[in-house]
Image: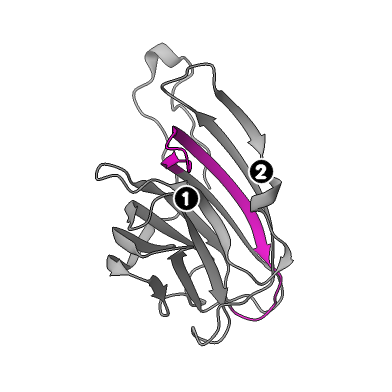
Amino acid sequence: MSIIKLNNRAVKDATAVGSITGLGNLVFISRSTASSSSSLSITSGLTSTHKEYIFYFNNIHPSAQATNFTFNLSTDSGSNYNVTKTTTYFQAYHQPTNDSNYGFEYAGSNDLAQSTGSQILAQNVGNDDDSSMSGYLHLFEPSSDTFVKHFLSNISYESKSGGGAVYQYNVYIAGYGNTISAIDAIQFSMSSGNIDSGVIKLYGVS
């Protein structure tokens, strides 16, 4: 990456600014649209072409109330979604009707420790007509045959507990798939019910 530099000695007299190169571009790969879908599986596009991939979640809406949005990885083109994972799960939360109920915490019950189960990306997502979940998931060099597969995610959503209390959450997740086999497919699903609507877009970073 080139360094930005002023072409004149004094900032006030600057007439031009150097350019930035090498940051990479987003390359659109696919769009998956949910319509009462039990899951959304992306089984193509994760190749050695790019060293980083980003999944963008746009207004994911569940059919069930207070359900979890999850993902899992595959090394056999989607025949099985059972890659061993270790993760961390932090969340900031705020109850707007009770301004004293807020915080930032490590939610250890939502992480994985060398587990093949699905990783929660958002817990207790609300299904009211105006509720949805949005955010992104980065997956790094899924085709590597040398390193484990790191990922990180940031999700914003409205949550409803069993008692109906409404919270706003911002969730941060990081972890790795403990395999040197190529990750070539990924599946997103709700822990109960369907993905009623929403879009997942896949981009590669060139």
Identify the residue at image location x=58%, y=38%. 91
- The CA distance from mark 1 to mark 2 is 33 Å
Using residue 196 as the reference point, say whether residue 107 is left or right of it.
Answer: right
Considering only vertical position in the picture, is 122 above or below 52?
above
Q: Secondary structure at mark 1?
A: loop
What's the residue type where badge 1 is placed? Leu
Magenta stretch: helix, strand or loop mostly: strand
Residue topped by disc 2: 107
Q: Nearer the viewer, mark 1 or mark 2?
A: 2
* Residue furthest top as drawn: 12
Query: Under tag 2, what secondary structure?
Result: loop
Q: Residues within 10 Å of mark 1 (few under 14, many from 20)?
A: few
Q: Which residues are magenta?
A: 156-182
Residue underneath mark 1 = 23
Who's the residue at 44% across and 16% down the image? 11
Residue 104 coordinates in the image, percent (x, y): 62, 30
Q: Where is residue 64 drawn, in percent x and y?
A: 37, 56
Q: Earlier in the sequence, mark 1 or mark 2?
A: 1
Is the image coloured rainbow, by chain, by secondary structure, or in one colour? Answer: one colour
